[in-house]
């Protein structure tokens, strides 16, 4: 099992409830594929660096999870099929990245 993090941007025309429903949908895709969700963050509505689909803001979300490599293809297909997703990026975390993320969360709790 490798550890991954995915960041995706939802279209800003969604309500808060609709944005949370979309996040739950992608978490369900992961859990159905036997992935273990380690951490999830909602970064809220942020200004984009450049317009995407003529929109200048979007709802940012991060999900950190442990899964087999085959799960990534399923997740990215789900992202591509959903019109609410403007952009997404999934990265495999190496041991240094994992340690840094865990340390940062521990410091935030303290």
Image (cartoon, grey):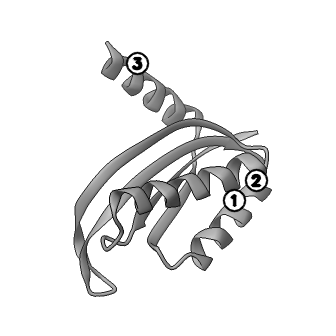
Determine the CA span between mark 3 and mark 1.
27 Å
Asked if 24 appears above or below 101 in the picture, the reply is below
Residue at the far top: name it: 110
Mark 1 vs 2: CB contact within 8 A:
yes
Q: Residue sitting at 43 percent across and 62 percent down?
A: 18
Residue 106, given in percent of the width and then of the height, sits at 40, 18
**Foreground residue, 19 or 100?**
19
In the picture of the structure, the residue carrying the numbered disc 3 is: 106
Q: Which residue occupies the extreme bottom position in the image?
A: 54
Q: Cβ–Cβ below 8 Å for labels 2 and 3?
A: no
Compared across the picture, whether 107 is left or right of 56 comes to: right
First-in-chain label (3 vs 1): 1
Residue 80 position within the rendered picture, expressed as x and y whole percent measured from the top left: 59, 77
Residue at the (31%, 74%) spot, across then down: 13
Pick the quarter of the image with the N terminus. Answer: top right
- Tag count in the figure? 3
Element type where label 1 sits in the image = helix
Q: Which residue is mark 2?
A: 69
Residue at left offset 66%, top offset 51%: 28
Question: Which numbered dot is residue 72?
Answer: 1
Q: Is residue 53 above or below residue 33?
A: below
Q: Residues within 10 Å of mark 1 (few under 14, many from 20)?
A: some
Report x, y in % for residue 56: 22, 76
Q: Quadrant of residue 11?
A: bottom left
Give the spatial CA distance, label 2 vs label 3: 27 Å
């Amino acid at each position: 099992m490798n550890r991954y993090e995915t960041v995706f941007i939802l279209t800003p025309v969604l309500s808060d409830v609709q944005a949370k429903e979309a996040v739950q949908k992608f978490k369900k895709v992961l859990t159905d594929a036997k992935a273990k969700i380690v951490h999830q963050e909602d970064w809220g509505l942020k200004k984009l660096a450049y317009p995407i689909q003529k929109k200048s803001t979007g709802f940012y979300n991060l999900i950190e999870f442990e899964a087999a490599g085959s799960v990534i293809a399923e997740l990215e297909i789900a992202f591509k099929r959903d019109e609410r997703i403007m952009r997404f990026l999934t990265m495999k975390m190496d041991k240094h990245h994992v340690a840094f993320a865990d340390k940062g969360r521990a410091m935030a709790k303290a």
